[in-house]
Image (cartoon, rainbow, N blue to C red):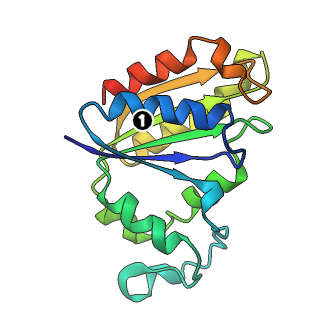
């Protein structure tokens, strides 16, 4: 049994990204402990690149925000899944802020061994995901992490559009394989 944390990167409650994350979670819950962390529920400031965390005791960030609630959850996770809407060929700014705040030596003590990626885009262009997938592969390589899989869903602009695609079942199956 693995501990899985899903970082849901949309601020739109009940939207396509949240539904994708929930379907993945339902599949994963069959054999794992799963928690969804919705960025909409946390106030996380962006990293300012000061590197003070490299000098501070425990490698803590000087910014006192909700990352202090997120760090321990990520530190205990065996698997992290990132779910995001695609905005201008990138993940959401809110999810990016959380990821950027992992620029700390603290992450070297994390248990995570595997990542997964779930993306939802309004665009019909299959290339809309390319830049995100490239960054994802670089992160896997840099940290020597196992690829838990990627699911990219096009043509889901309006809230609930994802219900008309096979994506939710695909997300469930991807989660079940964790």
Instruction: Determine the secondary structure under disc 1.
Output: helix
Q: Residue furthest left?
A: 1
Q: Is residue 86 above or below residue 50?
A: above
Q: Is residue 164 above or below residue 121?
A: above
The residue drawn where x is 66% and y is 31% is 16
Relative image position of residue 149 (x, y in whole percent): 42, 26
Relative image position of residue 52 (x, y in whole percent): 53, 83
Badge 1: few (under 14), some or many (20 or more) residues near its Cα, within 10 Å? many
The residue drawn where x is 24% and y is 43% is 2
Relative image position of residue 151 (x, y in whole percent): 53, 23
Say left or right for 129 vs 38.
right
The residue drawn where x is 39% and y is 19% is 173
Say left or right for 72 vs 85.
left
The residue drawn where x is 56% and y is 11% is 166
Q: Quadrant of the N terminus?
A: top left
Say left or right for 76 vs 163.
left
**Residue that carries the numbered disc 1 in the rendered image:** 25
Relative image position of residue 58 (x, y in whole percent): 36, 82
Front one among 100 and 169: 169
């Amino acid at each position: 049994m693995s501990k899985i944390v899903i970082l849901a990167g949309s601020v739109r409650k009940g939207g396509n990204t949240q539904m994708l994350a929930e379907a993945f979670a339902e599949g994963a819950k069959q054999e794992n402990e799963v928690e969804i962390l919705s960025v909409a529920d946390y106030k996380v400031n962006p990293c300012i690149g000061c590197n003070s965390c490299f000098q501070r005791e425990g490698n803590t960030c000087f910014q006192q925000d909700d990352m202090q609630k997120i760090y321990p959850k990520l530190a205990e996770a065996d698997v992290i899944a990132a779910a995001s809407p695609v905005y201008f060929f990138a993940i959401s700014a809110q999810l990016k802020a959380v990821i950027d705040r992992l620029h700390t030596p603290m992450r070297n003590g994390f248990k995570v061994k595997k990542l997964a990626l779930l993306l939802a885009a309004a665009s019909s262009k299959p290339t809309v995901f390319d830049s995100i997938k490239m960054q994802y592969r670089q992160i896997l390589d840099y940290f020597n992490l196992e690829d838990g899989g990627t699911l990219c869903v096009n043509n889901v602009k309006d809230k609930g559009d994802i219900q008309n695609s096979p994506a939710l079942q695909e997300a469930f199956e991807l989660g079940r394989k964790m």
